[in-house]
Image: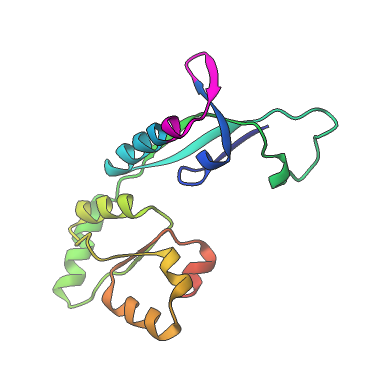
Amino acid sequence: MIGKGATGEMPSVCSHMRLKEKIISLTEENRNNVMGLVNLYKEQGFRGLILVTGELSLDEVKHPFSVADEKEIVLQGLLTFLDLPKVSAAMAIAALRENDVSAKVLNGDSPVITAEIYRDVGLDPRNIFISFDIEFASDENLSKEVELRTAFCKLTPRKSHAF
């Protein structure tokens, strides 16, 4: 079985990791080292996915796979992607600002990546709202946040609909 997933969630389902040619236990120290590397890439504006593998016997192979199949998962590596904002983004945001129009950004990225993109296009990265805060916000409070904030990140499509 081969899988991929979000850098924030996948290490928690892995019991082992590949280190060069060896498969070793994914200790808390190793997990922290992986997350340190992930965060280093995020700070540079990279998005990432964790690549994992698992073994299933022929008797266990069924479709669709479920959470129950996630046992003895091996973290194989980190895939990174650089998705730079378009050159015209900064100019478009400046034009909006000149006309007293504020830009609001809704995305599924992490706060670190969102802040990096904000800096790249000339926006203030200090005013970011993270999706898990939505779970605890009343409609009235969420409405206030939409007025106050300029970026909303770690959103799923379902959570984006709340806005």
Asked if 149 appears above or below 67 in the picture, the reply is below
- The residue shown at (78%, 43%) is 63
Residue 34 in percent (x, y) is at: 41, 33
**Residue 153 placement: quadrant:** bottom left
The stretch drawn in magenta includes residue 10:
no
Residue 157 in percent (x, y) is at: 52, 63
Asked if 151 appears above or below 30 in the picture, the reply is below
Q: Please, which colouring scheme is shown?
A: rainbow
Quadrant showing the N terminus: top right
Relative side of 23 to 47, left or right: right
- The residue shown at (81%, 34%) is 60
Asked if 148 appears above or below 71 in the picture, the reply is below
Quadrant showing the C terminus: bottom left
Relative side of 21 to 144, left or right: right
Of residues 146 and 137, the one nearer the viewer is 137
- The residue shown at (27%, 76%) is 148
* Magenta residue span: 19-31
Residue at the farthest front position = 28
Residue 118 in percent (x, y) is at: 24, 56
Residue 51 in percent (x, y) is at: 53, 33
The stretch drawn in magenta includes residue 22:
yes
Asked if 75 appears above or below 108 in the picture, the reply is above
